[in-house]
């Protein structure tokens, strides 16, 4: 484009008025370009515009591209015309240049301004690549993209962590996971499906890793041998996804000063009840038959990193007592379930495993969980008419990006976060 005329539009990232030479850094989604007004080459009208400009004004500039030893990207634009499209008021609620850092709550309260920062845009370009890479992988393996309901006639996983919604003369629930409808698609003969969409959890949690609304890549597959098939599919998808980010997002990773490593194959697997012994050896006592807590999750991650030098690992065979009714028990020892979590850099990323497809056992497990089978007949009745072995997983998109980029808070990888204290913007 050198020596060619161009028109560029964007926001004023910064402006410097030096008299004989004036500079504007103009920013859009593609990056930042320097617009330079030189007294000996520009008209007086052009030079007089520079002192009027303020940070975050919106401009449209027509001019010629020339090489530059001063501009960071190696070229600049000499303007023939500058149109002020929109003026920004001052002072700004925060500085997108990050010359003056803002408090986290200030950033979230002024999220639109916060998202103007080049590194914020880089995060979401990478997140877009993560989602497209997951789709690319799944469709190459014969999975069909499906859209399952977000409004449920009953809580999809039971419990109190569910949002109720007025639905005409009755009530509905926002889905906690697209789990049950994915299973119904297996019974419908769809064989392999995935669903990328939102889910909701009414958790009164304000941690850096929890939100009340999140997105996931939810996968289900038929005719599996056991949960190991599900684990292998998830591992392959994760490796493919990270490789695509490493290959296609060099500019964004450079902007974030982040290097990512493509994980080694054969993610380590820890299984109950051995997990209790591993934790006990590091001084954490978890009662037999119970789930582990956040402290234990971090301890297991440290153990895997030291023993296997791996950031990823699976935890398998959770106690059935702490899992939903639809998971399959281990037939040889029904204390345990074919239920699998994937952990990445110390944080659970996904839950999954093999589902129970035998109708009598599904009903038995509903009773065991003290759930009235009548309320779940819409889900369980299709199991009467021939049900294939199946399983799957759901991996949280925002959490995955948070850990991939070593962000401090999952809200940084969420465009507009929702938590117990935040419902706007």
Image: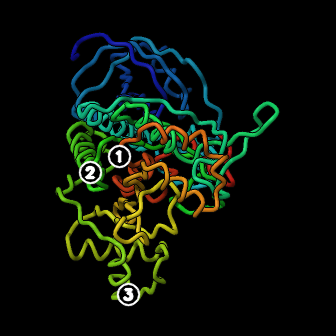
The residue under the point 35% across, 87% down is 282
Q: Are marks 3 and 2 in contact (CB under 8 Å)?
A: no
Please provide percent x and percent y for residue 395.
40, 49
Q: State whether residue 24 appears in this view.
A: no
Q: Are marks 2 and 1 in contact (CB under 8 Å)?
A: yes
The residue under the point 36% across, 65% down is 331
Say whether residue 89 is left or right of residue 193. Answer: right
What whole-number distance in Å separates the C-alpha atoms at marks 2 and 1?
Answer: 8 Å
Q: Nearer the viewer, residue 215 or 222?
A: 222
Image quadrant holding the N terminus, namely: top left
- Residue 135 sits in which quadrant? top left
Q: As drawn, which residue projects farthest toward the right? A: 169
Q: Which mark is residue 389?
A: 1
Up the image or down, 135 lies above or below 234; here it is above
Disc 3 or 1, which lies upstream in sequence?
A: 3
Residue that numbered label 3 is attached to: 280
Please provide percent x and percent y for residue 138.
29, 36
Badge 3: few (under 14), some or many (20 or more) residues near its Cα, within 10 Å?
A: few
Instruction: State the scheme by which the image is colored.
Output: rainbow
Disc 3 or 2, which lies upstream in sequence?
A: 2
Secondary element at tag 3: helix
Up the image or down, 28 lies above or below 390; here it is above
Disc number lying in front (3 or 1): 1
The residue under the point 59% across, 43% down is 175
Residue that numbered label 2 is attached to: 225
């Amino acid at each position: 484009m050198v020596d060619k005329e161009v028109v560029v539009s964007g926001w004023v990232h910064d402006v410097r008025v030096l008299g004989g030479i004036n500079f504007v850094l103009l920013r859009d989604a593609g990056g930042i370009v320097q617009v330079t007004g030189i007294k000996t080459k520009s008209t007086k009208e052009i030079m007089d515009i520079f002192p009027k400009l303020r940070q975050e004004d919106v401009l449209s500039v027509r001019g010629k591209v020339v090489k530059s030893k001063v501009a960071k990207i190696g070229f600049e634009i000499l303007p023939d015309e500058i149109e002020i499209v929109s003026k920004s008021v001052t002072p700004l609620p925060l500085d997108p240049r990050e010359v003056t850092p803002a408090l986290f709550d200030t950033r979230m309260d002024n999220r639109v301004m916060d998202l103007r920062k080049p590194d914020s845009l880089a995060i979401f370009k990478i997140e877009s690549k993560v989602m497209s890479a997951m789709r690319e992988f799944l469709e190459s393996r014969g999975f069909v993209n499906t859209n399952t309901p977000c409004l449920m006639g009953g809580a999809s996983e039971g419990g109190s962590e569910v949002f109720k919604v007025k639905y005409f003369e009755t009530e509905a629930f926002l889905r906690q996971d697209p789990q049950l409808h994915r299973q119904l698609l297996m019974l419908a003969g769809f064989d392999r499906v995935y669903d990328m969409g939102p889910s909701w959890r009414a958790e009164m949690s304000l941690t850096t890793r929890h939100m009340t609304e999140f997105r996931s890549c939810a996968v289900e597959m038929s005719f599996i041998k056991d949960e190991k098939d599900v684990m292998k599919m998830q591992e392959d998808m994760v490796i493919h996804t990270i490789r695509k980010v490493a290959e296609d997002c060099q500019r964004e990773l450079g902007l974030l000063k982040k290097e990512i490593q493509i994980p080694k194959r054969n993610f380590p697997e820890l299984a109950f009840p051995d997990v209790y012994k591993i934790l006990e050896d590091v001084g954490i006592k978890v009662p037999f038959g119970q789930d582990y807590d956040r402290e234990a999750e971090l301890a297991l991650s440290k153990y895997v990193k030291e023993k296997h030098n791996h950031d990823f690992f699976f935890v398998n065979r959770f106690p059935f007592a702490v899992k939903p009714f639809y998971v399959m028990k281990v037939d040889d020892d029904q204390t345990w379930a074919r239920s699998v979590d994937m952990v990445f850099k110390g944080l659970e990323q996904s839950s999954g495993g093999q589902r129970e497809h035998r109708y009598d056992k599904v009903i038995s497990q509903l009773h065991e969980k003290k759930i009235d089978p009548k309320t779940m007949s819409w889900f369980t009745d299709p199991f009467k008419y021939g049900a294939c072995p199946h399983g799957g997983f759901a991996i949280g998109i925002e959490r995955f990006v948070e850990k991939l980029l070593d962000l401090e808070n999952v809200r940084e990888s969420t465009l507009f976060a929702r938590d117990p204290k935040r419902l706007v913007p």
